[in-house]
Amino acid sequence: MDDPSATIDWLNDIDGLKFWASSGDLDQWLTAGDVWAAPATDGRCLALQEQGVPVEYHELDMEVDGTTYSAVGATTGAYVVAGTEVSKLAEIYVHLVNQPAGLMPYLTDRAIYRPTNPETFTALEAEAPERAALLTGDPATYYQADYEAFLESRPEWIEQWNREFQG
């Protein structure tokens, strides 16, 4: 985690490796058939499928310390502006979007990412089984990285990455 050299060397050995500046770039490449595989999220893949692009999402089946994980769990959440004058309202919002009832309108209408809270997924299966079938997955099988521990090494990763791949 604290030394990116092995990862950067591994990436340098991949013939034909391309990096994209935005998810839109990757979507365009996949749609045009300019890439044959990409480390994209399940949600990006589902969104492309819904647009008729012939792509498939495959689990990672990544082994870490003897345990196999189907995917990497990544948390996104509610963003609240620091120092907001409506802190009580922001607090209500944060609690709402972290509960099944608060997420259900989003999940049943536009969601393309799997819920990572098992309770939310169970609620989605009950309320919108056709949508849940598209967002299958067991959050218990997701690798949860220690992002807090990684933050200490992040500047080194960025420095080496930029030196190697940004020119």
Image: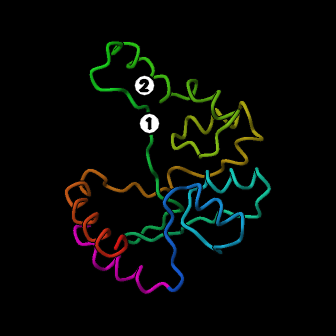
> Is 76 situated above or below 41?
above
> In the picture, residue 29 is in which quadrant?
bottom right
> In the picture, residue 144 is in which quadrant?
bottom left
Q: Position of residue 34 (x, y in %)?
A: 66, 73
Give the residue displayed 27% in from the left and 21% down from the top.
83
Can residue 52 be found in the magenta stretch?
Answer: no
Image quadrant holding the N terminus, namely: bottom left
Question: Which residue is situated farthest in the left direction here?
Answer: 152
Depth order, front residue of 102/6: 6
Give the residue displayed 65% in from the left and 61% down from the top.
28
Residues at marks 2 and 1, CA–CA distance in whole angstroms: 8 Å
> Is 18 situated above or below 42?
below
The reply to whether the C-beta atoms of the residues labelled 2 and 1 are less than 8 Å apart is yes
Q: Amino acid at mark 1?
A: Gly
Give the residue displayed 48% in from the left and 67% down from the top.
68
Q: Position of residue 98 (x, y in %)?
A: 47, 30
Q: Position of residue 136 (x, y in %)?
A: 66, 50
Residue 3, disc: none
Residue range in magenta is: 1-14
Depth order, front residue of 71/22: 22
Q: Amino acid at mark 2?
A: Val
Which residue is labeled 1 in the image?
A: 77
Q: Earlier in the sequence, mark 2 or mark 1?
A: 1
Depth order, front residue of 108/166: 166
Q: Position of residue 142 (x, y in %)?
A: 48, 56
Circle 1: element type: loop
Q: Residues within 10 Å of mark 2 (few under 14, many from 20)?
A: some
Which residue is labeled 2 in the image?
A: 94
Can residue 10 be found in the magenta stretch?
Answer: yes
